[in-house]
């Protein structure tokens, strides 16, 4: 399978955030063969869109009340097993799901970032928080 240059790549932290789980859960799902192993080796290990789709499918099936064994059975019915497995013929959620990251910049001020965007580095977020602190000071009736 060739990887397109513009295909999304996620670190484990980013994949976990987009999937609404912890890094530990991602690792557990890989260990339990619910998610394919990450691509690459060493520090270059990463996850792609197929990992995110599979993670979201696992979560959707769990939200329908299935145990992990039940999720595994459903995925085995509708997937090609192994690395790069794609989810197919799974029940469609009744509501469109999108992944967002919610950051409280300062008390009372939030930033919502689509899962399609990368978060800025921590230093830039600190600058944004400082700007918000200066410009929103006193706006709560003080």
Image: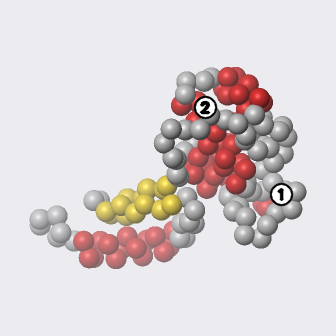
User: Which mark is in front, 2 or 1?
Assistant: 2
Q: Nearer the viewer, residue 105 or 71?
A: 71
Residue at the spot 52% in from the left edge and 51% down from the top edge: 98
Q: Quadrant of residue 22?
A: top right
- SS for callout 1: loop
Nearer-the-camera pick, 76 or 101: 76
Specify the label residue 132 is tagged with: none
Q: Residues within 10 Å of mark 2 (few under 14, many from 20)?
A: many
**Residue 3 falls left or right of residue 70:** right
> x%, y% of residue 69?
70, 23
Among numbered discs 2 and 1, the one appearing first in the sequence: 1
Q: Position of residue 46 (x, y in %)?
A: 74, 57
Label 2: which residue? 61
What residue is shown at x 71% (from left), y 28% (from top)? 74
Above or below, comparing residue 140 to residue 13 in the picture: below
Q: Secondary structure at mark 2?
A: helix
**Res. 40 mark:** 1
Write the residue at 43% across / 60% down.
Answer: 112
* Disc 2 and disc 1 in contact, CB within 8 angstroms: no
Where's the C terminus, which quadrant?
Answer: bottom left
Residue 51 visible in rendering: yes
Residue at 56 percent of width and 66 percent of height? 117
């Amino acid at each position: 399978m060739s990887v397109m240059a513009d295909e999304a790549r996620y670190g484990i932290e980013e994949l976990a955030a987009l999937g609404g789980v912890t890094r530990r859960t991602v690792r557990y799902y890989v260990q339990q063969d619910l998610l394919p192993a990450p691509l690459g080796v060493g520090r270059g290990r990463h996850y792609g869109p197929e990992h995110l789709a599979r993670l979201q499918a696992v979560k959707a099936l769990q939200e329908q009340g299935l145990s992990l064994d039940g999720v595994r059975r459903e995925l085995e019915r509708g997937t090609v097993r192994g690395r790069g497995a794609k989810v197919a013929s799974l029940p469609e959620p009744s509501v469109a799901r999108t992944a967002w990251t919610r950051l409280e910049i300062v008390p009372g001020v939030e930033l919502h970032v689509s899962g399609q965007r990368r978060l800025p580095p921590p230093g830039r977020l600190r600058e944004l928080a400082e700007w918000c602190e200066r410009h929103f000071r006193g706006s709560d009736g003080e």
